[in-house]
Image (cartoon, grey):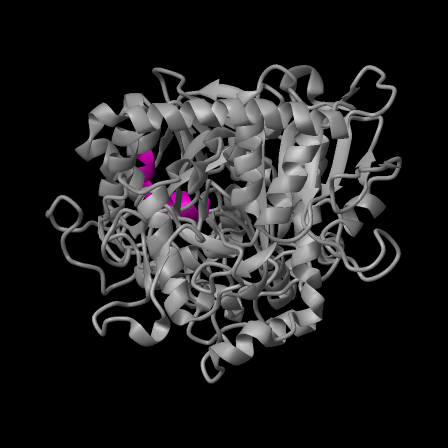
Amino acid sequence: MIAVSFRSAFSRAAMTSLVLLLGVFAKPAMADDPLPVKVVVLSMFENGEPTGDKPGELQLWLERNPGLKEMPFTLGEYSLYYGENGLLVACLGGGIPNATASTMALGLDERFDLSKAYWLIAGIAGGDPEDLSLGSAAWANAVVDGDLVYEIDAREIPDEWPYGFIPLGASEPADGPQDVSTGWTLDTISFSLNAGLSEWAYQLTRNTPLLDTPAMQAFRAEFINYPLAQRPPFVTRGDTLSASTYWHGVKLNEWANDWLRVYAGESAEFMTSNMEDSGTLTALHRLGRADRVDPNRVLILRTASNYTMPPRGRSAAWSTTADYPDGGLGALESAQRVGQPVVDALITGWDNYESTMPQAQARVPVVFDTDMAIDDWAALLFLARHPGIELLAVTVSASGEAHCEPGTRNALALLDLVNPHNQIPVSCGDEYPLDGYFVFPVQWQKDMDTLSGVTITPSLRDPDTRHGVELLHDVLASAETPVTILATGPLTNIAQWLERYPGDQEKSDRLVVMGGSLDAPGNIIVPGFTDDNPNTRAEWNIYVDALAADKVLRSDLQIELVGLDVTNHVKVTTEFAANFKTRVDNPAAAFWDAVLDANDWFIDSGEYYFWDVLAALAVIDRDRFCEGEMLGLAASYEETDEPWWPTSDKTMPENNWEGTPRRHFAAVSAGVIEQRDGDKNTLFCRDTDAEAAFRLFVDTLTGPSSTEPVSEMNGGSKGD
């Protein structure tokens, strides 16, 4: 205790002297009132001149933020650049010593008031190919130093050790639980960042279009054993390891993953390696002691310019010194493209953010019950990309158009297009309606199972093993706020859920359903499949499982019914498809563009509408996209001894969901929506803002403008 007290006292005295000393050098000869700084952007290196030549980490910030004025910075490696809007851009110099010294000098520079400034460290890094692809951007939750370590020469590592690094205070490598409490310099080994601030930045930027070049694509193609490394670049969250040594290789990549978990906790995920951030954070935390800066206002964005280990067939020695594809341009672009919206938001929102740090906006928690048909794909991508939606789970209603195995597999792959690190569970319900024998056309089912022949990278995740109804129940049970349920297929899962867990209704504030028709004509007439069917009023989702629909409509749930009466306002046209093609700038949009190409015949027929998409839009803005009236509704189903075989599947189990003999329903009335007496629990949608609907969909699936075309898949032909 005496030694600790002495060291603390000495550190305080030394810190005071350093503040006074550096203050003398940093203070201009004639100091005016300090310039107010709202955001500091820290880059680490530059190639050649600050502007006009081959860019490093500084140049793009200067060229894309006009109005910045150069200011001398004697104690730094580069000049400073300040704008009247409160933006200060600095380049620290590469490596931990440069970063530490430059940050400390900047923090003590009396020309600036940095007391309330936000700090954005934005630079390139090595990326773990298990987690990232070239050009991907990762917002850090934690920074861990990799230099403060016991090290054994590689030629003397014991055979049973995976590598020669030992945590300070420990006696063996970090590939397991470690007690490092007796190690020294613990205050500069691991830094946790403000989780709320990092999440806000991620949510703000997660759909940012990123540069992807042929050189980047060719290089990542070599990483055949690392599926995430082969994806187009994306934005995610993940932790960063800081070390002055430019390390490389499979064994050291294993060490980096272990090291992060020892010092930042078991939930830490190593994604990027950098050579400065622990030094920068050390300086900022020291400055925080003197109230010069607020170290709780720090963001770190690292982008992958290369991988931290080689591909198969390449040596670590080759990979360590290999040129970055396009000189790392993709990563340099990502650092500025992803960081700029955060800078802009902080500056424009300064009236609020000066005193209160931003937090991620509250999002609508949603469970999506879908039959994974063509319009469901678009709705799923919309839900996954919209910043106002928190998608909790996806349940597949396999009594609809897609079968269980392909339906869940495709849902997982589509979710990965938006965020390869997502953990949204996907599971399936029963493959047959509650009762009756009606099915969608077999040809449609084949087409939906194969995503209309459009190829897509399979997900690394497996479907959840729980029945869809059980997953829905478990998600609602663990939710902290009421959950919105969106159902865009037959209501088989929803009806079973209501039957098994009636108490769950209070956990859901609304059920949005795409289905039904009240005054508009039905849509179940399919030449060659439903010829001569007497039913002209039903909609497919309700027709296939009319019993389930009736149970749901008669429940106590608050329902919004997005039926044909309103979806007829949102026809998908060739003009829409052509305009959408010009906006494609990310893998999700590229997939949907390929689907539209594969279904041009459907668009040309004039029978394709944004059915499920409009229902998803209503989740976000009911007033705009679902104008209607409150009604009490029911779905018709009438048992018959005269089956309608053309739309029936004779291979269904003989017993229905209750274990009693499965019945046939009269085709003439099955699924017809009718008004009923009693509680008016359903908002029946009659009108919508069609122009706004298409605009919101496109703006959500794509970025504000197209830069470089990005593609995850090759457009395929229509499936058989």
Judging depth in this view, the residue of 133 and 24 nearest the camera is: 24
Give the position of the N terminus as an image quadrant. top left
Residue at (24, 46) in percent of width and height: 434
The answer to whether 473 is drawn above or below residue 30 in the figure is below
Q: Position of residue 514 (x, y in %)?
A: 47, 39
Q: In the rendered view, does 154 fall on the left or right side of 417?
A: left
Judging depth in this view, the residue of 474 and 229 nearest the camera is: 229
The span picked out in magenta is 539-550
Report the residue that reaches farthest toward the bottom. Answer: 313
Judging depth in this view, the residue of 20 and 659 nearest the camera is: 20
Which secondary structure class fits the magenta region best?
helix
Residue 206 makes an appearance in the image: no
Q: In the rendered view, does 9 fall on the left or right side of 326?
A: left
Q: Position of residue 642 (x, y in %)?
A: 26, 54
Give the quadrant of residue 513.
top left
Judging depth in this view, the residue of 300 and 356 nearest the camera is: 300
Residue 282 makes an appearance in the image: yes
Give the quadrant of residue 331.
bottom right
Q: Position of residue 19 (x, y in %)?
A: 63, 25
Q: Position of residue 401 (x, y in %)?
A: 40, 57
